Amino acid sequence: MSIPFACHRSDAANATGLGDALAAVLAFQSEWASILLRRSDRNFELAADLAASLEHGDHLEVLSDHVMFALAEIPVEATTIAAAGDRMVSTFAAVLRT
């Protein structure tokens, strides 16, 4: 009786490859979660600053400061996510090649 499919890798190599793939996915999720946490912190800071600025009438200045910081931070965050995604895809490609 023949086996309908066969794996060309040993069980040890298969386990190592899956471990590498899992580590890559977890690293990507960790980066993504870290960025989402920073973004939500910034949004809460904006809400608090806007609420405090209503008494002083400088809410437009607070909003423009927030936008300027976001314009500086978001490209860096996008680059970080792209690099983590690239590492994840490269790891998966290496796992599939072996």
Image: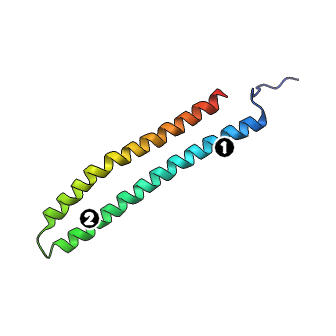
Which residue occupies 51% across, 38% down? 87
Q: Which of the 4 image quadrants contains residue 94?
A: top right
Q: Residue furthest top?
A: 2
Which residue occupies 48% across, 43% down? 84
Q: State which quarter of the image contains the C terminus.
A: top right
Label 1 crowd (10 A; few <14 / some 14-19 / many >=20): few
Which residue occupies 27% across, 70% down? 48
Q: Position of residue 45 (x, y in %)?
A: 29, 66
Q: Position of residue 74 (x, y in %)?
A: 32, 49
Q: State which quarter of the image contains the N terminus.
A: top right
Q: Which residue is mark 2?
A: 46
Q: Earlier in the sequence, mark 2 or mark 1?
A: 1
Say what amino acid the circle numbered 1 marks: Gly
Q: Position of residue 21 (x, y in %)?
A: 61, 41
Report the coloring of the rendering.
rainbow
Q: Secondary structure at mark 1?
A: helix
Q: Residue furthest right?
A: 1
Q: Residue furthest bottom?
A: 55
- Tell whether 58 sits left or right of 34: left
Q: Where residue 65 is drawn, which disc sits there?
A: none
- Tell whether 33 sits left or right of 46: right
Query: Does residue 26 lie above or below 56 as drawn?
Result: above
Say what amino acid the circle numbered 2 marks: Leu
- Tell whether 80 sits left or right of 45: right
Q: Which residue is mark 1?
A: 19
Q: Position of residue 19 (x, y in %)?
A: 66, 43
Query: Does residue 60 lie above or below 55 as drawn?
Result: above
